[in-house]
Image (cartoon, rainbow, N blue to C red):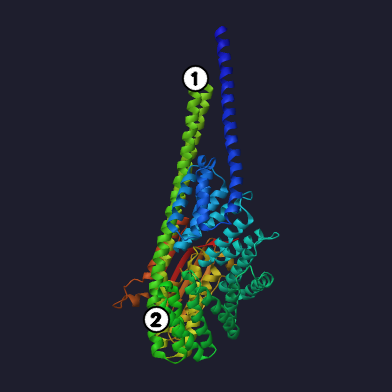
Amino acid sequence: MSFLSNYDLLKQLSVILVLVLLSCCEKKARDKKQLRAEALEVLKELENESQKLSGDEQTVFWQRRLSQKPYSGDSVLSARIHYRLAGSYYYKGDLDSIKWHMRKAWDLMESQDGPTEMMALLNYGQGNIATIEGNLHQENYYFNHASQIIFSDTLIGLTPVQIASLYLATAQSDANLGQYKQAMEWNRRAIKTLEYDRAPVALQYRAFRQLANNYRVSSDDSIDSAYHYMQKMEALSRRYPDQVNPRFLYDEKAHYFTKIEQLDSAVVYHLKILEIDKQTVESANPHPSFFSNLFKDYVYLSDSYLKLNRQGLAHQYMQEATRFLQEEEKYLTDADYVLYQEALVDYFFLTHQYKKAYQEYSRLLDKNQILYENEYAQSIAEMSTIYQLQANERRILSLNRQVLLSESKLAQNRLLLVISGLSALLAVAIVAILYIGKKQLRLKEEKEKVQLQKSAIELEQRLLRTQMEPHFIFNTLSALQSYIRIEEKEKALRYLNKFSRLLRNSLELSRESQVPLENEIETLAYYLELQRMRYDETFDFEIHQPSGEDIVNVLIPPMLIQPFVENAIVHGVANAAGRGMISVALKLQEESLFVSIVDNGPGIKAVKQKPDGKKKSLSTTISRERLEILAREKGVMVQVTILDRHEMDSTLTGTIVELIIPVESDF
C-alpha cells in the first residue's frame, strides 16, 4: 500500500510540475508576443517620421534603430527595419543595396511565424526590384502574391494607403501582361480602399487613369467606360490642380481621341504633352523613361498629322524623331524603335514613296522578329525563375515545419530530463503525436509532388503554344509584304486591318491556358478571311457553331484547330480543280468538343504522292503533342483522325479531319 501511495503521489507531483512548466512557457510566449506587438506599433510611428527625411537621412535613421533594443533581438522587427533600409536605397537607385537588405529581411523571416503584413511587404518590395530589372513575369508574381495575402486577411496591419498602393501596382503589372479583366478588379479594390475622408488624391487619380487605360486598350466596345474614368480624372484635376500630374490626363485624352478618329483634338493634347516632356527631359536628373516619352511624342504627332493629310508637319516631326533617335539612342528601347519604324513605314506609304516604304518595312520585320525572340527568351527565363521560386518556397515551408518540429522535440526532451518519472501513458501520447505529425508531413509532401507535376505539364503546354506563334505570324505577314511590293494600296490596308484584329485576338488568347469557345471561333473566322484574301478569293468557307449551347461559358485550349484548317487551305483548296470550299463543324457532347474540317481539295492520298507530300507540318505536329499532353493531364480521350473523301465515296475529293478536344465549363 505504501509503494502504491508513493507512486500515486509521484504521479500527481509529475503532473503538477508539467502544468507549471507549460504555464511558464505559455506566459513567456505571451510576453514575447506582447513585446513584439508594442515594438511594431512604435516602428509604424517611426516609419511616418522617416517619410519626412531625405534618402540619405532615412538610411542613417534606420541603421541606428537596427542596433537598438528591442529591435536587434527580434527577427521579425529586424526584418521590418531591413525592409525600410531597402526602401531608403530605392529612392537613391542603389539596386545592389536594395537587394542586400531585402535578402536579409527574407532570411530573418524564413524561420519565423511573423505577421502576414510583413510577408505582404516583402513580396511588394521584391516586386519593385523585378520592376527595376524589367522582369515583368517576376514582378507580376510578387505583386499578385502580396495582394492576395492582403485580400485574404481582413485584419492585416497595413494602412489604407499601403494597401491601395499595392493593389494599384498589381493592377498595372497585370495590364502590362494583357490581363485587363484582372487589372480592372485590382483597380476597383484600390478605389474602394480609398473611400475615406482625406484619402490621397494622387492615388485616386492613378486608379482612375489605370481604369481608363484598361478599358481603352482592352476592347473597342469599352471606349465609353474609358471616357467615364477620364471625366473622373478631369474632375480631380480641376479640384486639386497642385496634387495631380496633368500629363497623365492629357495622355489618356490624346489616345482616346486618336482611337475615335478625332485627330485634331488628339494633336492638341499631344502638343501639350510634348511641352511637358521637353521640360522634364531638361530637368536636373532626368530618368531614361522621360527620353522615351519625348521620343514617342514626336512619333505620335507625325503619325497624327500624316493622317490629317498635313504632310509638312508630319515630315517635320518625323525629322525630329529621327534626330532624337540618333542623339539619344542609349535611352530608347527596342519597343520605341519598333514604334518609330511603324510610323516611318506609314509615312513613306501614304506619301507614295513605296520603295522606301518597302525598305523600312523589311527592317521593321527584322526588328519585330528580334524583339519577339528576345521577349520569348526572356519570358521563358522568367517562367523558369518563377517555377524555381515556387519550389524554393515549398522547400522553405517544409524546412520551417521541420525546425518547429525539432524545437518541439527539444522542449519535450528538456521536460523529460526534469520529470524522469512521467507515466507510460504520457510516453504513448508523445509517440502518437509524433507519428501523426510525420504522417501528415508525408501527405503534404505527396500533395506538393502532385502539384509540381501539374505545374510542369502546364509549363510544357505554354512552351508548345509559343512555338506555334512565330510560324503563324510570319506566314501571314508574307502576304502583306506581297501586296506592298505590287503596290496594291487598298488591299494592303484592308489586309492589314484584318490582320491586326486577328493578331490582337491571337495574342490575347495565347496568354491563357483555356479560352472561351466563342473567342476561338471568332479568331478562326478572322484567319479564314485573311487566307481567302491571300488566295485571291479562290475558295469559300463556312463555320457551323454548336446549336443551343452557351459557347461563351465553354473553355478550350487556344489555337488547336487553326493548324488543321491551315493544312486544309495549303494542301487542300489551294490545289482544288475548281472553286475551293472549307467547312468547319463543331459539336459539343458531354465534356468534349467534336470538330470536323472538310475540304474539296485533291485529298490526302494525292498529296502524299507528290515529291514534298510526305513533309510533316510543324504546327499540326505541335497540336498533336498538345493534345497528348491534355490527355495525360486530364485523363480523358483525345483523337485526331484524317480520312480521304475519295476512299469513302468515289464521286468526292478532299480530306476530312476529325478532332476530339476536352473542354471545361466556366459556370
**Residue located farthest toward the top when viewing the structure as drawn:** 2
At label 2, which amino acid type do we have? Ser
Can you see residue 377?
Answer: yes
Q: Identify residue type, mark 1.
A: Ser
Q: Earlier in the sequence, mark 1 or mark 2?
A: 1
Q: Nearer the viewer, mark 1 or mark 2?
A: 1
- Residue at position x 52%, y 63% in the image: 173
Identified at 61% across, 38% down, the residue is 34
Quarter of the image holding residue 612? bottom left
Residue 257: name its quadrant: bottom right
**Residue at label 1?**
420
Q: Which residue is mark 2?
A: 478
Percent position (x, y) of residue 118?
A: 55, 49
Determine whether label 1 and label 2 are within 8 Å by CB.
no
Asked whether 271 or 571 is in front, the reply is: 271
Numbered disc 1: secondary structure: loop
Residue 606 drawn at (x, y percent): 34, 78
Of the 4 image quadrants, the one containing the N terminus is: top right
Locate the C terminus by quadrant: bottom right
Residue closest to the eye, 362 or 61: 61
Please provide percent x and percent y for residue 305.
53, 87
Q: Does dot 2 land on a helix, a strand or a loop?
A: helix
Residue shown at the point (44%, 52%) measured from the top left: 100
Q: Residue at x 57, y 48 (%)?
A: 116
Query: Please, is residue 406 above or below residue 371 in the view?
Result: above
Query: Can see residue 642?
Result: no
**Front residue (pair 172, 131):** 131
Residue 35, horizontal then vertical, whole percent: 59, 39
Q: Farthest right residue?
A: 197
Question: How packed is label 1: few (under 14 Cα within 10 Å), some, or many (20 or more)?
Answer: few
